[in-house]
Amino acid sequence: MSLAKYKQKRDFKQTREPAAGKAAKDEKHIFVIQRHHATRLHYDFRLEMDGVLKSWAVPKGPSLNPSDKRLAMEVEDHPYDYKDFQGEIPPGNYGAGYVYIWDKGTYELLESNGKPFDKEALREWKSGSLKVVLHGKKLKGEFALVKMQNGRDENAWLLIKHNDKYAVHDPYDSEDHTPKSVINKLKGPQNTKPEAKAGAKKAAAPKKAATKKAASPKKAAAKKAVPKKAAASTGKKKPRKVNR
C-alpha cells in the first residue's frame, strides 16, 4: 500500500514520526489506538493490513457500549512502525500536539474463512464492512467498522461494538480510561504554532514585574515613617536660661 500521502504531509527533519517500517513476519496482526490531542482531540484507530496501518480518526473515541455508533473518519495509511509512536509532534507540523498509546494488541477477522489474512481483510475493507476481534488491554471482543452509505463524506465510517461478553451497557467515555497526567498536558490549539511556547513565556513575565511593583509602596511607606522619629526626638524644648 502507498504511503505517499502520509509522507507529503510531514517534514521528517522536524518530527520524530516514522517515515517507514515493515511488518514483522508474524501470523498475528496488530492494532493500536492512539489518543491524539491536536487542534481537536480524537483517537486514531489503526489496523495492520497488507504491511501498513489502515487508519481512522474517531472524534469521541472508541466505546464498549453497543448502543454507541462512533463516527470514524478514514485517513491516510500510516507506516507499520507508527504503532510504537508516542510523544509530541512539534508546533508548526502537521498534527502538532501530543500522541499517547491508549491501547494496543492483536486482532483477527471475525470471519476469516481460512483465507489469507491480508487478502480477506482488504476485501472486507473495500466492501465497506470490516468485522474484527480485538485482543487489547482496554478493548476486547468483536467490533465492526461500517462505511456510511449516501453520506456527504466518502471517508465516513462507524465504529460499533458487538454485543458480546466484553460489552458494557453503561455510558462509556474513553477519557475516563486515560491517565490524568496525559489529559492535563497543555496541547491542542496552543501547540499548533511555533510562536505558542514563546508566547506562553512572555505571558508569564508580567507576573514578576507585578510582584515587584506591589512591594514598592511598602518601602515608600516605611521611608515616610522615618521622619516621625525625628520629629519625636526634636519635639522636646530646651529649658531657657534664667538671668539672675
Image: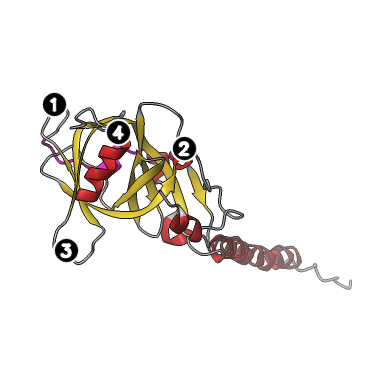
Tell which tag, 4 or 3, sits nearer the viewer: 4
Q: CA distance from mark 4 to mark 1?
A: 25 Å
Which residue does the image show at 56% across and 61% down from the upper left? 207
**Looking at the picture, which amino acid does disc 4 mark?**
Phe
User: Which element carries disc 1, helix, strand or loop?
Assistant: loop
Q: Residues within 10 Å of mark 2 (few under 14, many from 20)?
A: some
- Could you tell me residue 209's position as x and y percent? 61, 64
- Residue at 17% in and 28% down: 166
Asked if residue 236 is positioned above or below residue 187 in the image, the reply reads: below
Query: Left or right: 210 with respect to 31?
Result: right
Which mark is on residue 194?
Answer: none
Residue 199 horizontal/vertical position (percent) = 55, 65
Q: Quick one: label 3 or label 1, which is nearer the N terminus?
A: 3
Circle 3 SS class: loop
Q: Which residue is mark 2?
A: 84
Residue 93 located left or right of residue 143: right
Per the image, the residue denoted by label 1 is 165
Circle 1 crowding by C-alpha within 10 Å: few under 14, some 14–19, many from 20: few
Between marks 3 and 1, how big is the CA–CA gap?
Answer: 32 Å
Q: Image point 41% across, 26% down: which residue? A: 26
